[in-house]
Amino acid sequence: MDVREISFDILRKIEEEDLYVSDVLGDRLRQLQFKDKRDRAFIKRLVEGVIERRISLDYLIDKLSKGKKRPDVRMLLRMGIYQIRYMDKVPDRAAISETVELAKKKGYAGLQGYINGVLRNVQKLCEEKRFDSYIVSSMETRFSTPKWLCDFLIKTYDKETALKILSDQFAEHDTVVRINSLKTDTAQLRDLFESRKVKTEEGKICPERCIRIKDYDMVKRLPGYREGLFSVQDETSVYAVSHIGIKPGDKVLDLCASPGGKTLLAYELTNNDGKCGLIYSRDISETKTEKIMENAERLEVPISSESIKQGVFLQISDATELDKNLVSLPDEEKMDVVIADVPCSGLGIIGRKNDIKYHTSPEAMAELSDQGLKILKNASKYIKSSGRLCFSTCTINPGENGEVVRKFLEGPEGAGFQILEERTFLQGIDGSDGFYFCVLARI
């Protein structure tokens, strides 16, 4: 298996079609038959790393070699440089020789000398510990993050906080799993993981429900996955849902629910003390609701129907469109809780989705802010007079978070609501992904 050629083809597809890594990498890896899991890990690390460091790599390439580069040649150089500087287990000679050989295979035999020369210069810079001095001339190149976003974080917070947020994207991030409390508890699941050599730590924000894990191959191969003992879910999301005040027997509406983590936790919280609540779980497409169903079935959470109203009731629905049927219900038949985890710029999860920073913009964030406010206004009309509403995002942009809530409270739909709890988690500071949530209730 030529892991570098596979990586090159994946990277080229991502760039040519302006796709997210997640749109391509996972499917491609599932198609391949790996005899050695190290090959899979190599491809994943190289593809994600080249994307993550793209601005820095391009800056260095342009510094070391003047003139316009063909896209394929630039990609080959990115791959070679990334291996030399950031993949310690790859010998420099292998990174250079294999990149040169790949260039030949891809039809660039005439540029083998040029590619070899650039990579040799990079090797020398690394040996003399001068590589990083080339890319620290600005925050943009140091953190491989668009300048506007660096400036935005400094203006929104302060330079010290911005540096911590930007640095966190390159840190190792543990996977967080939420236990299925209807089947197990944290101690039992940790014992199961550790019996299979999976390293575990208790959750930092929600330790009673979450475990952090590392040193494993694939989530689907973890012990207890098929049995539905756990699901992967950001710890901040678990914390937020746990703090809404969901009670056994409650009727809950999850408006933007896929892939289902909030829905399934809400079910666990309502299914207690001999009571079983009903969770209306909605998202905009069949693809998204199918993902919720897949996770519900694995955790053995019952799927509801019009005739059997308990468990999770799946519905395809656009949260930006007002559901007049729900609005017209008598107060006592409306929702006890509505969860609105709205679409956002994702600035809180750059460390896990390393190309989000290239796919957003100030204009896109403004549009998402307007969309979030529209969903929040709709959501407020679905809860009963004693109900609660949770508005959340996985971004750290106040314009999509607190400012949306303030606009809502200042408008007619917000009359009679008050904030019970509001919190922003910042990556690099709170030991978690970046996340915002606000729990509102009628006065």
Image (tube, rainbow, N blue to C red):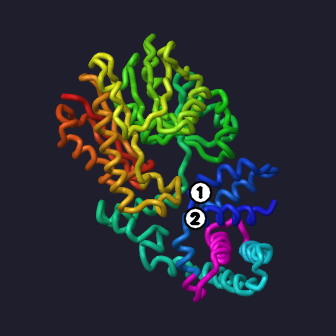
Are the residues flagged by discs 2 and 1 in contact, CB closer than 8 Å?
A: yes
Residue 380, image x, y percentages = 28, 33
Q: Is residue 228 magenta?
A: no
Q: How many other residues sit within 10 Å of disc 2, few (<14), some (14-19) or many (≥20)?
A: many
Q: Secondary structure at mark 1?
A: helix
The residues colored magenta run: 62-91
Q: Which residue is mark 2?
A: 51
State the mark number for residue 21.
1
- Identify the amino acid type marked 2: Ile
Residue 435, image x, y percentages = 39, 47
Residue 286, placed above or below residue 81: above
Q: Quadrant of residue 365?
A: bottom left
Residue 439 vs residue 249: left or right? left
Residue 413, placed above or below residue 170: above
- Which residue is more in the foreground, 207 or 302? 302
- Identify the amino acid type marked 1: Val
Instruction: Pick the quarter of the image with the N terminus.
Output: bottom right
Name the residue rendered at 30%, 53% in the picture. Answer: 398
What is the spatial separation of the Cα atoms under label 2 and label 1, in whole angstroms? 8 Å
Report if residue 211 is visible in the image.
no
Name the residue rendered at 22%, 45% in the picture. Answer: 406
Residue 100 vs residue 62: left or right? right
Q: Secondary structure at mark 2?
A: helix
Residue 240 vs residue 21: left or right? left
Residue 313, image x, y percentages = 49, 24
Q: Earlier in the sequence, mark 2 or mark 1?
A: 1
Q: How many other residues sit within 10 Å of disc 1, few (<14), some (14-19) or many (≥20)?
A: many
Residue lying furthest top in this view?
Answer: 274
Secondary structure character of the magenta stretch overall? helix
